[in-house]
Image: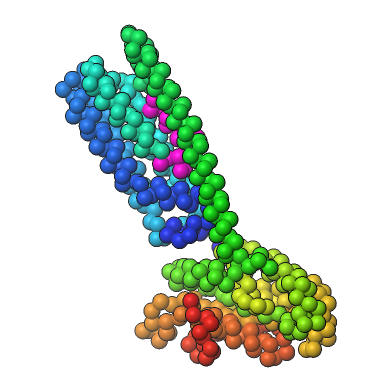
Amino acid sequence: MSTMVRKNLTGMFSSLFENQISYLLKHSSLNFWGNISLASMIVAALYSHAKNPIALLIWFGLVLLVSIIRLYHNNRLKPQQTHTEEKLKSWANNHILFTTLLSLLWGLAGLFLFPESLIHQVLLLVALSAVLISSISTLAASKTIFYLQVALLLLPIAGRLAVMEGHDYKILAGMLIIMGVMTIVVAHYVYKVLYELHKTQQQTQAQAHTDQITQLANRRYFDKHFKEEWRRATRDKTPLSLLMIDVDHFKLYNDNNGHQAGDQCLKQLAMSMKSIARRQGDLVARHGGEEFAILLPNTTADNAKILAEKLRHQIIKLKIPYKSPSSLLNVVTVSIGISSCIPRAQKNDKTGEDILYPAMLLGAADRAMYQAKQHGRNRVEVNSCDSKAIPIPLHKHQI
């Protein structure tokens, strides 16, 4: 069973890092055309006045080459596809590398291509300022790299101005350094504010998706996550298993012991469920009342049954006292229904296999759970996922 962290950039982001990647992707074309337009303007303005036109053309060629490579690299990451966390980090590192190379090239333009004409000097400074503003997008990936790019853009031309004859040039050099420092200070503040806003948003979102008693995912989040995993399993042709769990005679437990004791019982059961579903992608949710669901991506029915039996025995070992009408154990027990399938989005003409829908898996697991209850409770039942296994009352499972 895979342990890779898979991310889908078109879905709801679970971390600030994923939001940053999305931001960089959205602005990749704008950054490309911005760099090319500025570089073309500089070449057109300075070519007839340049001491070494060949060096100017070489510089433009390098800017064009790095910009094209960065755009090609950016477009290789498809937002609608899923990616491992390692792949996202590799993409971000390469994007930072190419952006830093562009900043270095622009910094070298301020050092070696500095024109003698005042108008052209102002034009070059404006271009460098525009590049500095456009490089703010890198702040989304790394504060440190953004600060490095500020230095690469401004320090070369500031150094060039500082050694030139004339008091005005030295003042301008000082102003550029002050601008760089102020840019870093403002960027740090903006980054901090955005981080805090994102953190607050994530906390609010987590509360909306969390059952307040058990601290598990609630039904709303389960439905959303189930859709995503179903689509992923359909595309990757991997098995998807579902455990439906019902606490045996929980209404009687509540009536005899009180709702506070019932809530405490559910919390203990939730902890046991989380302990057996610990992979990235596994999801334990409170499905409603005393019903729970455990979604297990890339898991066969046999492996799901092993986990279910482990959970059933683990809950018995909790020894939550209760005089059950259907068991001599005198502890709280659960009934578990299992179903598993490899989702199919279209009918197979060769084998005659029908399309499988999410409701079929839900219905099959739900039916298996009721079979476990009918056969004496405190047991695990498995039901196949097909059109014949759909119970009549499907409206509560429509997703």
Residue for point 39% across, 22% down: 176
Q: Is residue 295 left or right of residue 231?
A: right
- Give the main secondary structure, helix, strand or loop, of the magenta stretch: helix
Residue 197 sits above or below residue 348 on the image: above
Q: Position of residue 68 (x, y in %)?
A: 30, 42
Q: Nearer the viewer, residue 4 or 393?
A: 393
Q: Position of residue 303 (x, y in %)?
A: 62, 73
Asked if one can make out residue 105 in the rendered structure from this viewpoint, the answer is no
Q: How is the image coloured?
A: rainbow
Residue for point 55% across, 55% down: 202
Q: Nearer the viewer, residue 99 or 12?
A: 12
Q: Position of residue 337 (x, y in %)?
A: 63, 82
Q: Quadrant of residue 113?
A: top left
Residue 331 sits above or below residue 195 on the image: below
**Total numbered circles:** 0
Residue for point 32% across, 8% down: 165
Q: Is residue 333 left or right of residue 381?
A: right
Q: Which residues are magenta?
A: 137-154
Residue 158 included in the magenta stretch of the image: no
Q: Quadrant of residue 301?
A: bottom right
Residue 140 included in the magenta stretch of the image: yes
